[in-house]
Amino acid sequence: MIYTVTVTTSDERNAGTDANVKLTMYGALGDSGKRPLEQRWRDLFERGQTDTFEISCLDMGELDRIKLEHDNKLLKPDWKPLKVVISTGNKYVPKIHMKMYTKTISFSVKH
Ligand SMILES: [Ca+2]
């Protein structure tokens, strides 16, 4: 199953990061494990930017939680993600609003 993950970074000063970001999704049937959110030739997670990733994973059932973390690398790694949207072909997880100022954040999906 392909999970499409879009991550929007807040449009504020110093909101972006160049640190390496990993995502874990947790669902009723299991979790994805830590997945790096990366693309070649693109500066990810910049201020006001929306980045899209496709993650291939077994069906996790209804998602109830995700965890975003980064490795605190490079200059000014602090990151303020604004929104994460996860969708699959036939399921849709509503928008999640959150802020992250520390290295790791966990939050629940609001159905
Ligand atoms: Ca970046």
Image (cartoon, helix red, strand yellow):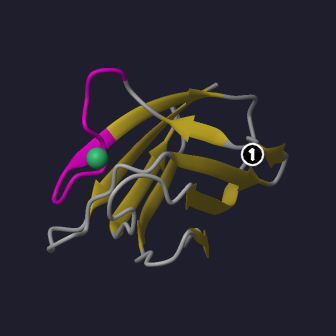
Task: Give above or below for 27 relative to 67.
Answer: above
Task: Give above or below for 59 relative to 64.
Answer: above
* Front residue of 80 and 55: 80
83 horizontally vs 67: left or right: left
What segment is highlighted magenta in the picture? 40-51
Name the residue rendered at 48%, 42% in the picture: 87
- The answer, for residue 111, to whether it is visible in the render is no
* Front residue of 109 and 72: 72
The quarter holding residue 96 reads: bottom left
For numbered disc 1, what is the local secondary structure? loop
Residue 98 lies, in percent from the top left, at 42, 76
The quarter holding residue 64 reads: bottom right
Identify the residue under disc 1: 61
Name the residue rendered at 41%, 53% in the picture: 85
Task: Give above or below for 45 relative to 94.
Answer: above
Residue 8 lies, in percent from the top left, at 29, 56
Question: If the image is split into quadrants, where does the N terminus sit?
Answer: top right
Task: Give above or below for 20 relative to 94.
Answer: above
78 horizontally vs 22: left or right: left
Name the residue rendered at 57%, 37% in the picture: 36
Question: If the image is split into quadrants, where does the C terminus sit?
Answer: bottom right
Name the residue rendered at 50%, 60% in the picture: 72
The quarter holding residue 76 reads: bottom left
Residue 29 lies, in percent from the top left, at 85, 46
* Front residue of 50 and 39: 39
Magenta: predominant secondary structure element?
loop
73 horizontally vs 107: left or right: left
